[in-house]
Image: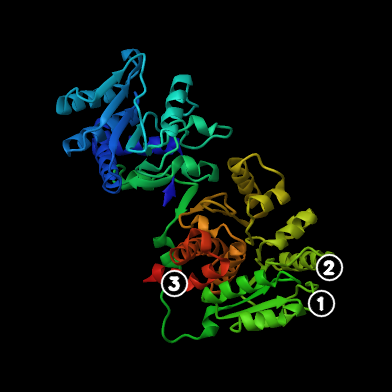
Amino acid sequence: MKLYTYPQIQAIEAATLAETGMTAAALDEHFGAGAAAAIGAALADYRCNVVVFAGPGRCGAIALAAARMLATDGRRPSVFFFNIRGTTATAETVAARDAYLQTCGQEGFQEVTGTFSMPDLSGRDLVVDGLFGSEMQRPLGGAYQALVQRINESGARIVAIDMPSGLPADGAPGLINRNIIHADITLALGAPRLAYFPPENAELVGQWQTLEGGFSRSATAAVEADYFLIERKQVRRLLPARRPDTSKADYGSAVIFAGSYGMMGAALLATRAAVRSGCGKVTCHAPRCGYYVMQSGAPEALFEADSDNFNIHEIELRRNYNAVAIGPGLGTADTTVDALESFLKVANSNSRAVVLDADALNCIALRPTMLDYIPVRSVITPHAGEFDRIFGRQPGSDARLAKAIEVAMFHQIIIVLKGHNTAVVRPDGKVCYNSTGTPALATAGTGDVLTGVIAGFMAQGLNPELAASAAVYVHGLAGSLAEKTHGSYGVAAGDVVDNIGRAIASIIK
């Protein structure tokens, strides 16, 4: 799915209206109907009073349309329409107000033109935030800040239309979260907004869902996007059902350089994940101390012993593998750093793409000149801390993503920026956000699992960009499946490995 900036959304809306002959008010009615249906679905599980706060702009018009439809469906809301001094509302919003009053009457409706008395709200209420949507591209003013803070503190369940009020559609650094609505559900108008995806906005946006059907397909297709959402249908095309006349030779081979004394668990997790991804043959190269661990924990994989007992001293390809991954549990011993640098120089000269994770990235942070030797189209998979250790401390996720785009384009590599809505940053500067995942993945070892899946998919013939995108989707889905069994507190990385096969099966069925 394409993700659009706010100016692009405005262009799509204008093209839709021109193409269909629909008026802006009619489009607001369409989204109002979708919002009413979504709010009604939330009310089915959450019996409570409905309180609607409608602003003077487009978002307010949609909120008023939704309130009218909820009222005619028997769910009479209390409505507060903010039209300060009686002059700030747009013509479309005034029309939506008049339609509400004509249908529902004055009872429970208050038009705020000056002084406002905050209603008593509690956990028995559902608040519809229709104050300001994408049209608000600056922080809220003082009176609206106070209103938002009171709503947030009330304990009420909150459904935001378009955007949580106070949060710009494309995000902005330095905002104060207490001055922004903290929504439980956010209803996207036609397409999700970019501000839904940065990690620090997760508590503001809550769960988001798209109100479909408002934009014409030709209008959306005509806009070139730089941001995308990874969805099941795209991953399904990358993982076709297997033919009956195949053997392990048809599904590639991968080697994983991983492990050191005391950290063989990371090597084991990455190796098992590569096996579960469907790779035909997986080899783990590790210190000799890992022999019994690997042979007992992953008997399906081959073990290739390093000459050293405790750390990897040799990172060399003894066979012609289809994919190479380096890093889980590798450690940062001087000899290991030397071995990684030597390997990257050779791989760079041969344009051999590799997957670099965990301690491979920490080795690079210790010797930053290695950045210049990372082969083109290689995949690196840093979390925020690892990224900042290599590329400098970033003030927030927006700055980190901008830096990742810059680095990916300069070095022509793929950066998997792990976290909430993991971002896959491609060498052309385009960004793909993952749509799967769960807080249950916030446990040691799950990053090693992701490395194994990426390597396994690359071994099976996916190019690095597609392998990374498919892997983060499968990895997130496997985490959700594990959570169903063990709960969000009880998931361990090994549980994620055990659900990789089930995740792939659910995608390709």
Cα distance in 3D space between marks 3 and 1: 37 Å
Q: Residues within 10 Å of mark 1 (few under 14, many from 20)?
A: some
Instruction: State the image quarter where residue 9 is shown.
Output: top left
Image quadrant for the C terminus?
bottom left
The amino acid type, in three-letter code, at marker 3 is Arg
Residue at x 71% of width, y 82% of height: 291
Q: Position of residue 464 (x, y in %)?
A: 57, 64
Cα distance in 3D space between marks 2 and 1: 10 Å
The mark found on residue 34 in the picture is: none
Residue at x 59% of width, y 45% of height: 401
Q: Is residue 9 visible?
A: yes
Q: Are marks 3 and 1 in contact (CB under 8 Å)?
A: no
Query: As displayed, is residue 26 above or below residue 330?
Result: above
Q: Residue furthest right?
A: 334
Residue at x 55% of width, y 32% of height: 175
- Residue to which mark 1 is pinned: 308
Mark 1 lies on a secondary structure that is: loop
* Sequence-first tag of 2 and 1: 1
- Residue to which mark 3 is pinned: 502
- Residue to which mark 2 is pinned: 335
- Compare residues 484 and 508 and report the one nearer the observer: 484
* Sequence-first tag of 3 and 1: 1
Q: Position of residue 193 (x, y in %)?
A: 44, 42
Q: Position of residue 413 (x, y in %)?
A: 63, 57
Q: Is residue 319 visible?
A: no
* Sequence-first tag of 2 and 3: 2
- Compare residues 491 and 235 and report the one nearer the observer: 491
Mark 3 lies on a secondary structure that is: helix
Q: Are marks 2 and 1 in contact (CB under 8 Å)?
A: yes
The amino acid type, in three-letter code, at marker 2 is Thr
